[in-house]
Amino acid sequence: MSDIKEKDNLPDWSAYRGVLVFVEQRAGTAKSVSWQLLGEGRKLADKLEAPLLAVAVGHGVGHLAQEAIYRGADVAYLCDDPVLKDYRTRPYSRVMLQLIEDAKPEIVLFGATATGRDLAGAIATHLPTGLTADTTALDVEPHPSRLLLASRPAFSEKMMATILCKQYRPQMATARAGVFEALPRDASRQGEIVRIDCPLREEDVATQVLDFLEESGHVNLEEAEIIVAGGRGLGGPEAFALLKALADALGGVVGASRAAVDAGWIGHEHQVGQTGQTVRPKLYFAIGISGAVQHTVGMANAETIVAINKDESAPIFQLAHYGIVGDLFKIVPAITEEIRARRGLAAERSFEAKASESA
Ligand SMILES: Cc1cc2nc3c(=O)[nH]c(=O)nc-3n(C[C@H](O)[C@H](O)[C@H](O)COP(=O)(O)OP(=O)(O)OC[C@H]3O[C@@H](n4cnc5c(N)ncnc54)[C@H](O)[C@@H]3O)c2cc1C
């Protein structure tokens, strides 16, 4: 990679400096991928010796600009206006286009969410630049080329491709949630908050958001702190009820391997892995899952991994922090029962404590 500059005679992009992260939010709550991108963006910016920039767009989102500073940004742009209350492509892309023109970041990053993909695509079609979608690894060539090395699975996920945008600026990418690590929140971090004006009025926008309808049975693996995932070892769809009971007892959600999804036992929205979701929960149960690399690539960043498998040589045990060798049909109900009992006991204790306080 180090011979990029010599070979390609790159244009002079010295007016473009800094890494800009779009802070995605809904109803004032940021998507965790935004903080993960700031964590990764910090590394890229430091390597380029450039500032890390963030932009919060919405209405009543001033706290997110401040939060972006706590999460690693040097400068947080804030565009706060009633027109921007709910995401709509036109007003949001207009804000971003104006900011890119004024601040001239060399790199712009978005979460590879429905909103991030829509927004980044709209911006890329307006700017003469490219967009690498759904990246899972980011790096930069240091000065002088300052190229973003945006990697993502390619050719039916069989290989990784690193994509460069040599001739245009900014270099843009969307990145999968759960891949990168957020920095610990540091409320003593100092940075600058820069307010920017919204370039549109409501009359200029052709679309209106009338309502949000929550999808029934929607599972939010990306934001989940506890995931109880099952695989082919479950033997059929019925056994997912055991996993759901454990997930409910723990306050978590149910995930799955592709084998279980392909068998039609559970929906694709539950799939973890290379062609599913990349997750980063505090606790991940891998139950009846062998640990194929296409699965582990999606969950290896979990803080604590517990594997339950009857085959002691299953590769998942190499990754797991805790391993239980045995039949999941015996082990899972026993764990669920124990957790329920402890929860019940804890609730009883806190009730007793309150009763004795008020006596
Ligand atoms: C391009 C490509 C993309 C892919 N993307 C993904 C992806 O996104 N996610 C994904 O998961 N896979 C993906 N795969 C598939 C992957 O390679 C594996 O085939 C899949 O992960 C296997 O799922 P599994 O572990 O549930 O099943 P298996 O590998 O069959 O493992 C089942 C496990 O259950 C255990 N078991 C059986 N009965 C019991 C019992 N009673 N108690 C306890 N343990 C038991 C067995 O010992 C075994 O280890 C992809 C493959 C390709 C080629």
Image (tube, grey):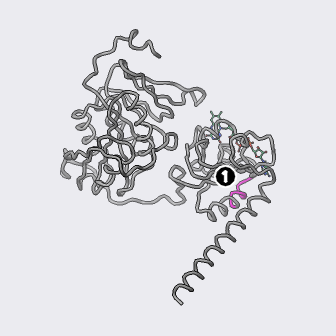
Residue at 35 percent of width and 56 percent of height: 28
The image shows residue 246 at horizontal and vertical percentages of 67, 61
Residue 253 vertical placement versus 48 (above, below): below
Q: Residues within 10 Å of mark 1 (few under 14, many from 20)?
A: many
The image shows residue 199 at horizontal and vertical percentages of 19, 44
Magenta span: helix, strand or loop, mainly?
Answer: helix
User: Along the line of sight, which residue is nearer the eye, 250 or 185?
Assistant: 185
- The range drawn in magenta is 236-241
Residue located farthest toward the bottom when viewing the structure as drawn: 359
Residue located farthest toward the front when viewing the structure as drawn: 188
Q: Quadrant of ligand 1?
A: top right
Residue at 52 percent of width and 49 percent of height: 222
The quarter holding residue 158 reads top right
Residue at 62 percent of width and 62 percent of height: 250
- Name the side, left or right, on which 123 lies relative to 306: left
Residue located farthest toward the top when viewing the structure as drawn: 7
Q: Amino acid at mark 1?
A: Phe
The image shows residue 10 at horizontal and vertical percentages of 33, 14
The image shows residue 140 at horizontal and vertical percentages of 42, 26
User: Along the line of sight, which residue is nearer the eye, 284 or 214?
Assistant: 284
Residue 72 vertical placement versus 64 (above, below): above
How many numbered discs, if any? Answer: 1
The quarter holding residue 345 reads bottom right
Q: Is mark 1 within 8 Å of ligand 1?
A: no
User: Along the line of sight, which residue is nearer the eye, 127 or 74?
Assistant: 74
**Does residue 200 show up magenta in the picture?**
no
The quarter holding residue 212 reads bottom left
Residue at 74 percent of width and 53 percent of height: 236
Which corner quadrant holds the C terminus? Answer: bottom right
Dot 1: element: strand
Residue identifier under label 1: 285
